[in-house]
Amino acid sequence: QTKWNLPTAYPIDNLHTENLAQFVKDVESGSGGKLVITIHANASLFKAPEIKRAVATGQAQIGEVLMSLHENEDPIFGVDVVPFLASSFKDSKKLWDASRPAVEKKLASQGLVTLYAVPWPPQGIYAKKDINSVEDMKGLKWRSYNVGTARIGELVGAQSVTIQAAELPQALATGVVNSFMSSGATGYDSKVWESLDHFYDTQAWLPKNLIFVNKAAFDALDKATQDVVMKAAAAAQERGWKLSEDKTKWYLDQLSSKGMKVQAPSPALADGFKKIGEQLTADWIKKAGADGQAVVDAYKKM
Amino acid sequence: MFGAIPLPELSMILLGFLVVILASGVWIAVGLGLVGLLAMVLSTNVPIGQVLATTVWSASASWTLAALPLFIWMGEILFRTRLSEQMFRGLSPWLQWLPGRLIHTNIIGCGIFAAVSGSSAATCATIGKIALPELEKRGYDARMSLGTLAGSGTLGLLIPPSIPMVVYAVTANVSVLQVFLGGFLPGLLVMALYMGYVIIWALLNPDKQPPRDPSMPFMDKLRQSAKLLPCMLLIAVVFLSLILGFATATECAAWGVTGALGLAWWSGTLTREAFFDSVMSATRLTCMIMLILAGAAFTTAAMAFTGIPAALAEWVKGQQLSPHMLVLALTCMYIILGCLIDGISMIVLTAVIVLPMVKQAGFDLVWFGVYLIIHVEMAQITPPVGFNLFVLQNMSGKDTMTIAKAAFPFFLLLNVAVLIITTFPQIVLYLPKLAFPD
Amino acid sequence: MRMVLDRLYLWSGYAAGAFLIAIFVLMMLLSVGREFNLNVASGDDFAAWSLVAMAFLGLAHTFKRGEMIRVGLLLERLSGRPKQVAELISLSVAGAFIGYFTWQAGQLAFDSWRFGDMSQGVVVIPLWIPQFGMVAGLAILLVGIVDELVVVLQGRRPTYEMEPAATPEELIERIASGGGV
Ligand code: NA
Ligand code: NA
């Protein structure tokens, strides 16, 4: 019997962790109990920033992490957070199919085997006032936490504010921040309606969680078990994608029922964002070079 | 590496090793790290050294934890000001009429100072350095005066800000702000218990009470009390920076330092030397605590690899143990531990094992944090290792046991406080829930 | 040699103190800056890294000053030869552990450099740079422990065992601002 540890940063009742639990069950039953995986949820074994490193160096055998967390290391990890490049589940899936070979190649160079990826619900804008065009965003106290959000803040003339995710609810309550971008899921989890009342469903991007396994650990399995893992991973990706899409609507309904104005962006706002998106895609391609260009070209052809 | 050792045996081996290594006088942080190493050697075949480096790096490079040195520094600056004298002069005119008279300045003075200091020993020493000689001069009962100081000094830990609360919050992965808020009402409760005890004692022993100070015209009283303003202003600066949205929970520690520096400058005690000393003292105390936290972070990960915490939580679930029985057992354990080791070590040494059990039993982790902090308070005044006892021993020249005896009623009152917050958890949870409704 | 070592501990302690002030300044800049439309990009990361540098660079100084806590109940009851042996055991155990720790921390920083690991916030910094603070601090602590080992082997009183305080005030200050929280 082989035992694997699986660190993840998200709580047990999160959609990704629920999906992961089913994956683990599939692997265990499929391998006839030969491979047992223990999930260490809620960053109880390793914290999010360290999970990739921990799996690459064999401290854990398998792990899950938000792919874009590593965009500073290689732009390919940030392809799914280029604003407005892929802004629906369908496009996001195409983008993943187009970028998967490049991501796999990069991970393989670090001794990691890619299993699957599942997106978070699309990112929208939370605010305290009406935003009918990008000009309305000028002067907002805007939480920026990565390159993309910082650039958006810069381009619309908002005031970037550095706040850690853990302090966001308190920062919202006391007005340290009055707008930020995130998914309906995050807004629901942090009870954003207590401080803000507008949600613009801009579907700016769909960040993905990536599940990978240490290559040496994977190679140590017999062929049959390897096949079981890969089959379960394919099923988990399919299931997770659907789960995320189903939950998206549920989360937005919850936000409305709590009294938030959940709405699609006005044509003027959408138009402004489209321009910003083009600019940021160009930024990204410049950073990612020919490989990045190839990924975007492949995506656009799909 | 050695195949699977059954968990009960493994737990016993690790516990025995921990006791031996700590008793032998090895530095606590090193001892913790070694227990983690042993746990991993006995139960996994992952690269142990890499886990050590990764978990320590990950635990130390923390924004939330960066508030810790600032709260420590704030206390160090205030310790070097004349705040305590101002506090005594400002409070004493108003407390003459209460049975127990100026003994109450110890309790209220510590309570107010606790709202700007995160340390118990510092609170005890700061208030004690002026109150102790003044009370002696007026002929107050020495035993009562020492006991109240020892007991009230511990309020530094319960009334926010609090160094061990930051340590707990980071260890248990709960919001520092919520634990801070949770400690506020229990802090007032403990003060009320202490004052009630002093009043009853004074009524029963009228002969042990010196006569009143000559009474003062009302305007003079007010003038004296104006001396309390700087301290109140400092408390206001910290809270307002947070509430008005100038600062996050972590950043308000920096506002505390700014306020403390301002206060020291205003009172003329901010010399270059005092500033320098405060920085270096704060640095050393932080280094000491951070290395223990580093050792604990590694041991926590090591324990997760062994599976012991999860198994224990399962066991608690299976036992159908009533939550109150669990709390009673934990209370006994913490009182014994508290006699022997310091509070921070007590928190981090037990967190790995206790937190999953407590969670399983359905306790709120913010509530448990406050419960644990009251036990840390007790640890400060139980012999042989109790830092408030050491402080007072040196201030009064009496031996540890005499002071421990004087502090014993207050140790019992802290137990009463534990009983009360266990029966009425709302006392802890009211403010955190008010600020973060669920 | 004595002077060089003592300066090493002291100055790394000063460096740690400087990082404490850096944390303070960063947080005030973040907080006050927001009111003036000034954002310290990745200020949270820089504060966290300063904390690491502070916590580790100050270790040797803290250790030498006897402010690293241990359970002294048994040690305090010993004297003479048994006490020397007990101290030697403690120091050897601590030296071995910190040596191993230093090596592994070095490995971590080296891997970060080798893999090109970057910080994850808005400002991109190679992670080996902040990690180096941890390695350096541990290495200096290791030197300090070996130094003490030699002192005790020579039959002298360990530096971390403080002289009894001259005045009660000194002792109060030591306890209030050191060992006990
Ligand atoms: Na306090
Ligand atoms: Na004690």
Image: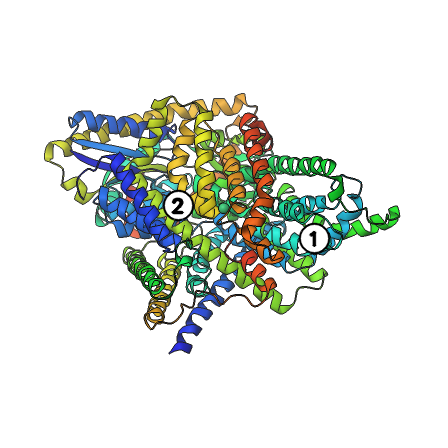
What residue would you read off at disc 1? B131
Which residue lies most toward the left here? A223
Q: Chain of mark 1?
A: B
B214 left or right, relative to A45: right
Residue B437 is situated, as x and y percent measured from the top left of the image, at 56, 28
Mark 1: give few (<14), some (14-19) or many (20+) Cα within 10 Å.
many
Q: Quadrant of residue B152?
A: top right
Labels 1 and 2 in the same subunit:
no
Residue B296 is situated, as x and y percent measured from the top left of the image, at 38, 47
What kind of element bears circle 1? Answer: helix
Give the colour scheme shown: rainbow
B70 left or right, relative to A250: right
Comparing B189 with A236, the one in front is B189
Q: Quadrant of residue A2?
A: top left
Q: Is residue A197 visible?
A: no
What kind of element bears circle 2? Answer: helix
Checking the image for residue A281, the label placed there is 2
What amino acid is at disc 1?
Answer: Ala
Which residue lies most toward the front here? B207
What amino acid is at disc 2?
Answer: Thr
Q: Nearer the viewer, mark 1 or mark 2?
A: 1
Is C140 placed above or below A177 here? below
Comparing C169 with A301, the one in front is C169
Comparing B3 with C115, the one in front is B3
